[in-house]
Each structure stands twice: as structure tokens, then as C-alpha cells.
Image (cartoon, grey):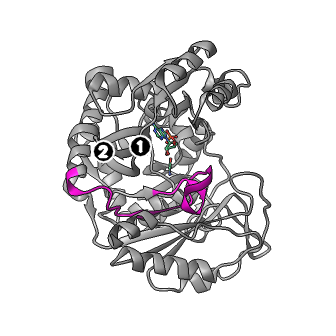
Amino acid sequence: MKVLVVGGGGREHALAWKLARSPLVREIIAAPGNAGMARFTRTYPVPAHDIEGLARLAEDQECDLTVVGPEVPLTLGVVDLFEQRGLAAFGPTRACAALEGSKWFAKDLMLKAGIPTAAAVATTDRDEAVSFARDMGYPVVIKADGLAAGKGVVVARDEREAVAAIDDAMVNRRFGGSGEMVVVEEYLEGEEASILAFTDGQRFGLLVPSQDHKRALDADGGPNTGGMGAYAPTPVVTPEILNAVTDEIIAPTIEAFSSIHGLTYRGVLYVGLMITTDGPKVIEYNCRFGDPEAQVTLPLLNGDLAAIMLSVVNGELDPSSVGVSPGHAACVVMASGGYPGKYARGKVIHGLSDAEAMEGVTVFHAGTDLVDGSMVTAGGRVLGVMGRNGSLADALGRAYRAVDAITFEGERHRTDIGYRALSRQET
Ligand code: AMP
Ligand code: GLY
């Protein structure tokens, strides 16, 4: 079959890379894709938010399946539009994508279904938000209700920081309409983990549990980013915790869509967890694959991604088709200097073919462009270098040896991906 992949980051490169390994897939095209994807797919300059343009492309190109990477087209209703046109698209409908598009929709579903999560209240009134924060006690978490490209969450250590975050969202309207309502949430302590599940709205199959590194600098310092690296499996998710997440979080979330909202959630369900001393609690849901979690969970997926996705779209997922391969995967993000703030573009990338020739290494592109035959930087997160091997230390060793082989002006990356898991092994 012919598959359209929507999006152009490292996650979408990983999706296309895994789809290309399916015997069912004859051809992959991407919109807009990136220079790494362009080496094995045809790319079309249709932006991911242009859902009409995407439907036209899928129709013109006679695609059998469309795989949507980012959240924005999902919350705009790309899957609903494709369904209306008789086109198959993998992902939740607009109403179901509210799980990520509105933090309060998600919180309300969790409260009604008894799913473990942080206590929270929501308001559209600035003064009420400030008094909710005071009542909750510090630290407290202030979240813009709507999508804010990962920048809408602030952990406020005191009243001054809480008021600044509330005013930023509600008075200065930094996130536009996304900050009209804010959620004031209890601060949870623990280690974070991400668990992704394929679901057809009834049955589900889990990908390997992973851990992302959201802060820009080593030892979790500096500002939040889209994600600077990830590894899987993560030992913080023990078999007991995985059982608890399955029974108390994943299954009831899928069930709540139909029992509370009369909806069927189909696609991938991303659960962001805090593993607290009281057990796992949800800190966020996403309605799509994580980036960079996809770059480590898909290489460890023992199954035919195209077949799994088709069965999800058709409402006939066989959970046993979603297997997990043994071993570990680790991904190190190479970013432009200055990211997540301002950064330069157009810096020539050297050493890619040496890195790609290394055993057990795959280089996923995120922000790259091909200009006059040279691969150059074109985004904040430039590459995701993935290493795979039996142990985590060996997977990280492969990833970092490949990172060392690649250079571009201003390049920076974290040197401590997987450190929590490695220090656990030592103790
Ligand atoms: P989110 O966009 O909801 O994933 O939040 C971004 C980051 O903020 C998370 O990865 C956590 O590190 C942190 N965070 C969000 N909610 C909480 C919470 N209730 N307690 C502690 N940290 C949180
Ligand atoms: N890596 C976090 C996310 O994709 O939202």
C-alpha cells in the first residue's frame, strides 16, 4: 500500500522508517517531511496544519493510509475530514484529540473515571486562579488549558512565580486563546515515564515504556524543550507499575471515552506519568506519539507498524500483534546552539555518513535541509541519533559514538541521557 506520513520532525522520520520495514508498504510519501525522510520518501510542501491540503494530497496520490504525527492537525479534525472523504487516517478524531487539546477535558475525564492524577481546579478568572494557587500551596503547577507547543506549563515555587505564570497566560495572552482558562494543579514528586498504547477504542497493545529528558541541560537544568533525548525500556516502570498503569490508567481511559462521552478513541494514546510513592499518576495525555519517545519505542516494536495501524483504523486491533523486542534503545538529540531560544539555521552538518555506517545506529532527522547538495541545519532540534544494543549502557555508547562523529557549528546535546537508569543499576 501507499502511505502518507504527516509532519516533518524526528518522530515522523522514525514513523516513516518503521513503516518502510513493513512488507505491506510499497511507497511512502511525506508532507512536509524533512531532508532525512526525502532520501526514501517523496516529500510534498503541504504544512501539517493545512488539513484540506492534506486531504487533497492523499486523494490525488491515492494513499491507502495516512499517519498523522503532530497534535495540531488532529485537534483541527484531520481524521474527521479524511473519514468524510472516505480516506483512511490513523489517529483520534477531533473530539477525542481534546484529551491533549484541553488539559481540563483530560482532568475532568480522569476525575470522573477515578484515574489517579494530581488534584486540580480550572478557572477563566485571573484573581480566582491566584487564590486557587494560594490554597493549593507551593510549589504549584500552572497550566494553560489549550495547546501551547509544550511551553504552557510552569512549576511555580512561590506566589510570585505563580502570579507571573497566571498573568502570562491570562493577561498577557502569551498562548492566545489557549490561556483563557488555566488549570491550577497539585505538584507531584517522583520520576517521570511515558507509556504509549495503540488502541482501536476497545483493545489496546502497549509499546515499551520510555523516559524523555525535557530540560535543555545536563542534570535536568535549564529551560523545558520539546525533548533532548530518550531511552527505553525505563527501569522506573517495573512490572508491578506496568500492571497498575494498564489496569488503573490505560484501560479506564479508553473505557471513559465511550462511557462518559460516547466516543471511540482510536490511534495512539500517550500517557505521561509521575511515578510517585503512592503509585503512578497521570500528569498529561497526548493524542499522538511522543517526540523523541517514538525514536526509541518504534525501533523496539516487534510488529508490523502498517498492519497494526490499519487494524486500529478498522477497529480490529489484535493486541498480540504489538510485541516488544528485547534490548535497549537510546536517542540523543543534537540541537542548534541557543535552542529552545533563538538559534541560527543553515549550518553545514558533517560526519553523517560515518555515523550512519556504525553498527546499531540510526540517525533520525528533525530540522535539516538539503541546500546545493549539502545537508544543513533548519530547526532547533536537528538530529536524533539512536543507538540500539542489548544493555542500556551499550545502546548509549553506540548513540554517543555516533554523536561524536557528527559536527555542525553551534551544536549542543545533553551528555547524560539515561543517567537515572544507569545510577539505579549502580546502586
Ligand atoms: P506537560 O506539558 O503537562 O507534560 O508538563 C510539562 C512538564 O511539567 C512535565 O513533563 C513535568 O515535568 C512537569 N509537570 C506537569 N505537571 C506536573 C505536576 N502535577 N507535578 C509536577 N510536575 C509537573
Ligand atoms: N516528548 C514529549 C512529547 O512528545 O510531548
Q: Nearer the viewer, residue 377 or 116?
A: 116
Distance between the Cα atoms at labels 1 and 2? 8 Å
Which amino acid is tagged 1?
Answer: Glu
Q: Nearer the viewer, residue 291 or 62?
A: 291
At x 52% / y 34%, what residue is drawn?
139
Q: Mark 1 highlights which residue?
A: 189
Which amino acid is tagged 2?
Answer: Thr
Residue 365 picture location, percent across and down: 60, 66
Q: Quadrant of the N terminus?
A: bottom left
- Would residue 91 be visible to someone looking at this image? yes
Does dot 1 land on a helix, a strand or a loop? Answer: loop
Question: Along the horizontal axis of the image, is 204 left or right of 2?
Answer: left
| Highlighted range, magenta | 212-240
- Mark 1 C-beta to ligand 1 under 8 Å: yes
Q: Mark on residue 277?
A: 2
Q: Quadrant of the C terminus?
A: bottom left
Mark found first going from the N terminus, 1 or 2? 1
Tell me the crowding category of disc 1: few under 14, some 14 to 19, or many 20 or more residues within 10 angstroms, Cα based: few
